Image (cartoon, coloured by chain):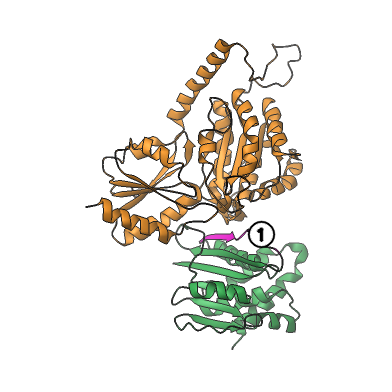
Chain colours: A orange, B green
Amino acid sequence: MANERMLMKGNEALAEAAVRAGCKCYFGYPITPQTEIAAYMSKRMPKCGGVFLQAESEIAAINMVYGAAATGVRAMTSSSSPGVSLKSEGISYAAGCDLPCVIVNVQRAGPGLGGIQPAQNDYYLATRAAGHGDFFLIVYAPSSVQEMADYVVKAFDMADKYRMPAMILTDGVLGQMMEPVVFSDPSDSTVNKDWAATGHKNERKHNIINSLYLQPEELEKSNIARYKKYDIVKAELPEAESYLTEDADIIVTGYGASARIVRSAVNAARAEGIKAGMIRPITLWPFPAEAYAKTVDTCKAYLCVELSMGQMIDDVKLATSCRRPVRFFGRTGGVIHTPAEILEQIRTIAKEELK
Amino acid sequence: MTSEIALAGFGGQGILFAGKVLAYCGMLADREVSWLPCYGPEMRGGTCNCSVCLSDDPIGSPVVNDPDILIAMNEPSFVKFIDKVKAGGYAFIDSTLVDSECTRTDIKVFKVPATKLAADNDLQGGANIILIGKLIKETGIISMDGIEATIRKMVPAKKAQLIENNMRAIRLGYEYAE
């Protein structure tokens, strides 16, 4: 079954790929629309020598990840928006201890308990404020079931490489939909985790995993060192897909499920003779600013499309240095935009901005 | 070519499964496919629908707003979706459960008493597959060989008797003439 195309839900494909990436510990708590991840892990983990545990709460689950990751194993938790809010304290602790781990957020509409339909309203949470304190997560935004599988593997690899937590920021559409997926061969992490708390056997100095620094100067030093690492991540990791951007007058941008709908709208606009293109960020942090910056000279206007009231648009404005108009179109509350609605926005921009 | 298909009916009629059969069949034919369920507060007895796209190109939106092909297996689904079918499209209606008449003349409508056919042929729960049989006959978007291969792959070995039942349902729909 190694290279066979399989028809799977995004949630299940992500879970299977995580197992193949060597995830040995999964801790979860049910919440729509991500429960299939936990359900899949509950069947799969016992068969491959891993641990599945349904925790008593989201908070417990993230702290179990924190503990497992401290021993150097690949550990993961998943939830949906309200559950990820609950995990934020633990995520901050993991970041403060430089622990590699993977957190999956299959977003649903908020705020509050909100609704269970797809949304992209946790962009700020993922890229700005996944918890208290000065820190970032690596954030991947897959846009197909295949990418749900591919990027969870990459998230584990990059989390290990840079010693920091990584998040898969996806949504109910991608979690619930089925598409063909091909799994790559299982990989083994070759990263040397000599920092892990694995028992010193009186043979080495013991490793301490801790985020508490009572001396301000020490904590400042630790934070500055972490930000130096972030500079390297920002230089090495940004990833984006550019589609028909070379000659585009209007660039429409969106991530995840939105990007799929944007692509349909861009194709429809091209069929009408409007030179539209798309930039799809794959890493949301670090944001792929360069993909935008190199279009600013030729592109005349941008349109940011999100399933939110407008969050990623801030990064698009920064990436384009506000040199061109950046308009916004979003649906929220679990409503999904149609290609026709986005096409109408593109037509309006063509009328108003391309004179 | 892209076919956007909406399937709708009561929870428990096998709407999601029928959609999965179509998607699986497309995948085995090496096409691009997507399947998206509604996952709201649906439950057995409530309404339920799913979107399936079969295409030769990468699929953009997996949400089917204006289907090329509609399968409607109850009255509320018929009412909700019939006006959304694209002109020139197809609608396959379970006429055992849908009383309304379709007044549109710009789409091809096929009424199949699928639930009754299933009951008369000892194929309870097979109305969804009967409608797929009719869909294959009228649209040609998937082949009989393809559907047989699909059903053989999807049915687990220990439930092998279901292969013949499903193929009987396919043939009932395929051969049904109004």
Residues packed near mark 1 inside 10 Å, few (<14), some (14 to 19) or many (20 plus): few
Q: Nearer the viewer, residue B100 or A9?
A: B100
- For the N terminus of chain B, give its image quadrant: bottom left
| Residue pictured at 61% horizontal, 41% vertical | A104
Q: Chain of mark 1?
A: B
Direction from residue A58 to residue A107 in the image, left or right: left
Position above or below: A174 against B69: above
Q: Nearer the viewer, residue B64 or A220?
A: A220
Is B38 magenta? The answer is: yes
Label tally: 1
| Residue pictured at 45% horizontal, 29% vertical | A234
Residue lying farthest to the bottom in this orientation: B178
Position above or below: B101 against A222: below
Q: Residue B101 is drawn in which quadrant?
A: bottom right
Position above or below: B56 against A78: below
Is B125 magenta? The answer is: no
Q: Which residues are magenta?
A: B32-44
Q: Position of residue A94 (x, y in %)?
A: 63, 27
Q: Position of residue A19 (x, y in %)?
A: 66, 41
For the residue marked with disc 1, what is the amino acid? Pro
Residue hosting label 1: B41
Q: Position of residue A195 (x, y in %)?
A: 64, 19
Instruction: Classify mark 1: helix, strand or loop.
Output: loop
